[in-house]
């Protein structure tokens, strides 16, 4: 008696309320590959993402794919058996009681019982024999050019892995401490560049003003990018950053972004961010200090009066 094995099938369907681009980005991170390879999984019918899995491992892969937004499914993998005899016996018994229909073990196409699949073109008996040989090997290695080889796609690493950090991107997730750390580094870098621009104004006011404008725009863009990632960690859309433009309410919302914890599990924006390192914690303290200094200096600076030079 052999243990049941399963395969993970994907038809290109998405989980409810999951945008296509977000799902493709999540799958690219999960499979550790580029978007072009992920695009090939859509619009081509059923694809076997993983084969010959025990039931417990198949459930873990299925959960990871569904959290990424892919509406995958689990099916029995008959080709994982080491012997063709049980399959032949089951097929013969089924043919006596059921209509002469079959399901292709490679692509899942349903058709009248025949030796060849009309969808993917494989010879059923040869395919099953090839899979039985591969299942007996310590590590299954498939020939990519053979139509009898199983799909090479598989989830890399632990399905519960962390997201990849990208500073200059609106995609991804970062936690509260990393948001403080990145904001502190951004503020320190911008302060140094603004000081350089102020010194250049002694040489050329036009050059100094131009440099200040460029620095301001760059700082705003990066602030939006890391702010969107902080909101993604909470499970909110990055468009909520527009609330910061509203007087008073924007200040309160900025405090909410610093205080509200993110989702511990994967959400519709991807897996959780990696744990904070000592450097992140130190930079978070720096960001908090710089923010406090900037806030105090803004409050204590005397307002300029019209006509007073």
Image (tube, rainbow, N blue to C red):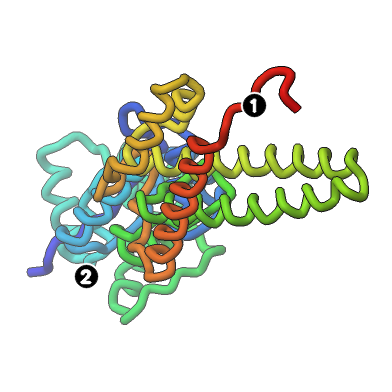
Q: Which mark is first along the chain, 2 or 1?
A: 2
Which disc is residue 304 wearing? 1
**Residue 208 left/right relative to 281:** right
Q: How many marks?
A: 2
Identify which residue is drawn at 89% across, 41% down: 205
Give coordinates of residue 277: x percent, y percent: 38, 68
Give coordinates of residue 200: x percent, y percent: 85, 51
Above or below: residue 289 compared with residue 240? below
Mark 1 residue element: loop
Quadrant for the N terminus, please. bottom left
User: Residue lying farthest bottom?
Assistant: 138
Identify which residue is drawn at 19% across, 58% down: 87
Above or below: residue 290 compared with residue 269? below
**Label 1 crowd (10 A; few <14 / some 14-19 / many >=20):** few
Along the line of sight, which residue is nearer the eye, 265 or 242? 242
Identify which residue is drawn at 32% across, 39% down: 234
Q: Is residue 273 visible?
A: yes
Q: Is residue 70 visible?
A: no
Give coordinates of residue 158: x percent, y percent: 31, 64
Quadrant for the C terminus, please. top right
Along the line of sight, which residue is nearer the eye, 29 or 275? 275
**Residue 62 left/right relative to 305:** left
Please say if the residues under marks 1 and 2 sit with CB atoms less than 8 Å apart.
no
Identify which residue is drawn at 85% across, 46% down: 201
Mark 2 residue element: loop
């Amino acid at each position: 008696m052999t243990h049941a094995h399963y395969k993970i099938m994907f038809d290109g369907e998405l989980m409810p309320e999951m945008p296509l681009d977000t799902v493709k980005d999540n799958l690219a991170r999960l499979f550790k590959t580029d978007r072009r390879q992920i695009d090939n999984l859509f619009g081509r019918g059923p694809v076997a993402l993983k084969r010959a899995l025990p039931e417990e491992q198949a459930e873990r892969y299925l959960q990871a794919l569904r959290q990424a937004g892919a509406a995958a499914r689990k099916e029995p993998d008959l080709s994982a058996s080491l012997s063709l005899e049980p399959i032949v016996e089951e097929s013969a018994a089924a043919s006596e009681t059921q209509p002469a229909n079959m399901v292709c073990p490679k692509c899942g196409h349903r058709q009248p019982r025949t030796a060849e699949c009309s969808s993917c073109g494989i010879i059923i008996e040869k395919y099953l024999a090839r899979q039985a040989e591969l299942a007996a090997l310590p590590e299954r290695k498939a020939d990519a050019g053979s139509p009898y080889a199983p799909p090479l796609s598989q989830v890399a690493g632990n399905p519960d892995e962390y997201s990849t950090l990208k500073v200059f991107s609106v995609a991804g997730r970062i936690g509260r401490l990393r948001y403080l750390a990145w904001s502190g580094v951004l503020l320190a870098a911008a302060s140094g560049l603004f000081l350089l621009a102020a010194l250049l104004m002694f040489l050329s006011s036009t050059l100094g003003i131009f440099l200040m404008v460029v620095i301001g725009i760059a700082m705003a863009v990066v602030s939006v990018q890391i702010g969107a990632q902080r909101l993604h960690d909470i499970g909110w859309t990055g468009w909520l950053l527009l609330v910061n433009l509203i007087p008073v309410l924007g200040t309160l919302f900025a405090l909410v972004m610093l205080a509200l914890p993110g989702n511990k599990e994967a959400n519709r924006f991807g897996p959780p961010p990696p744990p904070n390192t000592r450097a992140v914690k130190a930079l978070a303290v720096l960001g908090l200090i710089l923010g406090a200094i900037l806030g105090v200096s803004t409050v204590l600076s005397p307002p300029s009066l019209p006509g007073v030079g």
